[in-house]
């Protein structure tokens, strides 16, 4: 198993969140969505983008589990959509790079 697939396979999120994220994949637009989720971040390196999205998602899940008043399900789902889409795109484009 590769590094990213291992990390992603270990994620345990509520089924409804995962279903919503899968549904949102059809509307994902890399330029638009990454600019909003990762402002000021260079988007040229897909592996770095996935690493950053994993960090953001982990922080959001921590906030969700703690009942943080500033937590947003919508924002969390946006991050999950981006994470799924970027992982799929990287796997399709260059399967060998996932192991890097």
Image (tube, helix red, strand yellow):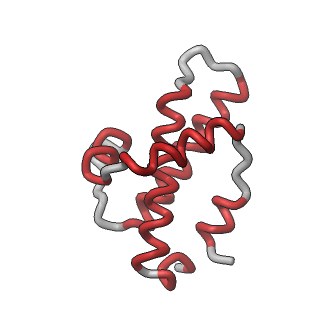
Query: Nearest the camera: 34 or 74?
Result: 74
Say if 39 sits above or below 51 in the image: above
Q: Is residue 44 left or right of residue 81?
A: left
- The tally of labels here is 0
Say if 56 sits above or below 95 in the image: above
Picture coordinates of residue 48, whole percent (x, y): 43, 63
Query: Nearest the camera: 50 or 16?
Result: 16
Picture coordinates of residue 32, whole percent (x, y): 26, 45
The residue depicted at 28 percent of the width and 57 percent of the height is 42
The residue depicted at 35 percent of the width and 45 percent of the height is 38
Query: Nearest the camera: 14 or 98?
Result: 14
The residue depicted at 52 percent of the width and 79 percent of the height is 100
The residue sitting at the top extreme is 69
Picture coordinates of residue 76, whole percent (x, y): 53, 35
Q: Is residue 51 left or right of residue 3?
A: left
Say if 56 sits above or below 45 in the image: above
The residue depicted at 56 percent of the width and 43 percent of the height is 57
Q: Is residue 42 left or right of residue 65?
A: left
Q: Quadrant of residue 94?
A: bottom left
Say if 29 sits above or below 78 in the image: below
Picture coordinates of residue 79, whole percent (x, y): 48, 43
The residue sitting at the bottom extreme is 96
Q: Quadrant of the N terminus?
A: bottom right
């Amino acid at each position: 198993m590769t590094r990213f697939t291992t990390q992603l396979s270990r994620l345990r999120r509520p089924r409804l969140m995962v279903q919503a994220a899968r549904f949102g994949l059809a509307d994902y637009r890399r330029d638009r969505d990454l600019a909003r989720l990762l402002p000021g971040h260079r988007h040229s390196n897909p592996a770095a983008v996935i690493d950053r999205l994993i960090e953001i998602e982990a922080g959001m899940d921590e906030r969700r589990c703690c009942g943080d008043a500033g937590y947003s399900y919508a924002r969390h789902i946006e991050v999950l959509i981006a994470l799924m889409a970027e992982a799929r795109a990287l796997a399709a484009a260059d399967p060998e790079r996932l192991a890097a």
